[in-house]
Amino acid sequence: MVLLLRKMTYFHNKNFLMRKKIVAGNWKMNKVLDEAVALTSELVNMAKDEVRNDAKIILCPPAIYLTTIQKYIENEPNFALAAQNCSDKVSGAFTGEISAQMLQSIGVQYVLIGHSERRQYFNETNALLAEKVNTALANGVSPIFCCGESLEQRQNDDYIGFVKNQLTESLFHLSEEQLKSVVIAYEPIWAIGTGLTASAEQAQDMHAALRAHIASKYGADVADEISILYGGSVTAASAPELFAAPDIDGGLVGGASLKSREFTNIIKAR
Ligand code: PEP
């Protein structure tokens, strides 16, 4: 209720209205081809029939399916594609890697950068992620930059400072124009795939702190234009309250994005 009231006061703020509303589905390493196609077709049909808001729906399938899924969404203006990762290198002898230029060449508009699983299992550091952000932007692919603290860090007094520092070290070298092409996804690691969701209050506090941090470097007008998504066990049940918070511009959804009914209901909550 408190968050809803706060959001209503924000409705008078032009920049708030200008921010892109986004619901992104991160399929991670799930689905074989037939299942990926079936999920996409179901989502497209359900969105046509049921979604009445203007949320951008971003699908993040495994890279091997990007060109196939592209065909199913190319005539759907609300849908877009994201890769789950890209190389920090431009091109060359990097076996198994996929460059931002390759993504751009097949029409991929977004790329997840710095997902906590990449940070944790592939040792991706803030400095490396800054390079990935650079190569994505240089090729016209918008980074969806993921950040967030572990449970251990949350129990430490300065967990907000920890997440702010992820932004500082990976994004704050960008120009104002470049930063405006970045979407931020706050994903507390303790909430990813665990069934534990941050409360709307907890998520709003972090989103507001990150927006203030951006404002301190780039000014309030720029900060007000940046979409900040929440991720971490979002479901159709938790989405309405989370999305009602004034600084939460949508969601990055993992497990629940693998089910067309559930994901569509989350999109409808946006
Ligand atoms: C994610 O992987 O980005 C995510 C938020 O996963 P889940 O929704 O399953 O917690």
Image (cartoon, rainbow, N blue to C red):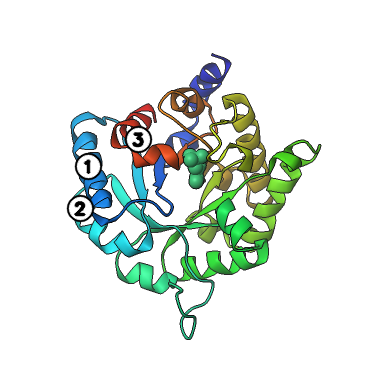
Which one is in front, 226 or 85? 85
Q: Earlier in the sequence, mark 3 or mark 2?
A: 2
Residue placed furthest toward the top: 1
Sequence-wise, the earlier of marks 1 and 2 is 1
**Does mark 1's beta carbon lie closer than 8 Å to ligand 1?**
no
Q: Residue at x 31, y 36 (%)?
A: 54
Residue 29 is tagged as: none
For the question of whether residue 69 can be seen, the reply is yes
In the rendered view, would you say 124 is above or below 226? Answer: below
Instruction: Give coordinates of residue 202: x percent, y percent.
Output: 64, 29
What residue is rendered at 51% in x and 35% in y?
Answer: 233
Q: Which residue is rendered at x = 48% and y = 35% of the image?
A: 16
Q: Is residue 126 left or right of residue 135?
A: right
At label 2, which amino acid type do we have? Tyr
Can you name the residue that lies furthest to the bottom here? 93
Answer whether labels 1 and 2 touch (C-beta < 8 Å).
yes
Viewport quadrant of the C terminus: top left
Mark 2 highlights which residue? Answer: 72
Q: Position of residue 131 (x, y in %)?
A: 58, 69
Horizontal and vertical percent position of residue 64: 33, 64
Disc 3 marks a residue whose amino acid type is Phe
Q: CA distance from mark 1 to mark 3?
A: 11 Å
Say which amino acid is labelled 1. Val
Q: CA distance from mark 3 to mark 2?
A: 17 Å
Any part of residue 227 in sight:
no
Residue carrying label 1:
44
Q: Secondary structure at mark 2?
A: helix
Residue 78 shown left or right of residue 167 in the figure: left
* Label 1: few (<14), some (14–19) or many (≥20) C-alpha neighbours in 10 Å: many
Q: Residue furthest right?
A: 157
Res. 263 mark: 3
